[in-house]
Amino acid sequence: MLDLERIEGLMKLMEQSSLKTVTIEDEGFKIKMSKLDNAPILAQGTLAPAAAPVAPAAAAEARQEDETELNITSPIVGTFYSAAGPTIPAYVKVGDSVKSGDTICIIEAMKMMNEITAEFDCRIESVLVSNEQKVEYGQPLFRVRRL
């Protein structure tokens, strides 16, 4: 099992290397790290159900309010980013259609950039938080309509 110290060590090694992307799997834990030019390393990980809930889930949680309108909520506590960098366009904006698995935002937690992905096909109805805003676990990030 990869622990936080090993993940941080891998991130430091990656920062010093010419690698752009690396994916590591170890006993039900999977982490993908991507390095963009002049941007922090992005990390996306998943844990097997039996593992400790230390690492964030790869997909955002959705809470149903009626049959088609839902909120995509934050799976972790951290800082919300709408894009991978200050000069890069936002992953999604109001009116965009999103496919299951598409990245919709980043939440930074403990100096790790966690890509949050859509769990289902949907259309973005509204963005409920602003860029660089601190978010809590379970806090609504997007109002969406299931497609």
Image (cartoon, rainbow, N blue to C red):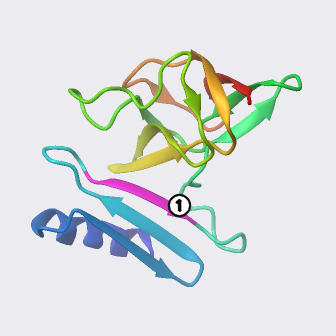
Task: Give the side of residue 128 with respect to residue 69, left or right.
Answer: left
Residue 131 on image: x %, y % = 39, 22
Task: Give the side of residue 88 with respect to residue 107, left or right.
Answer: left
Task: Give the side of residue 121 with respect to residue 43, left or right.
Answer: right
The residue at the point 57 percent across, 49 percent down is 101
Is residue 118 or residue 112 the one in the foreground?
Answer: 118
Asked if residue 19 is positioned above or below residue 42 in the image, the reply reads below
Asked if residue 27 is positioned above or below residue 96 in the image, the reply reads below
> Is residue 18 shown in magenta?
no
| Quadrant of the rendering where the C terminus is positioned | top right
* Residue 110 seen in render: no
> Magenta region: which residues?
41-46
* Residue 54 seen in render: yes
Snapshot quadrant of residue 96: top right
Is residue 100 or residue 137 the one in the foreground?
Answer: 100
Label 1: which residue?
55
Residue 115 on image: x %, y % = 45, 47
Q: How many marks?
A: 1
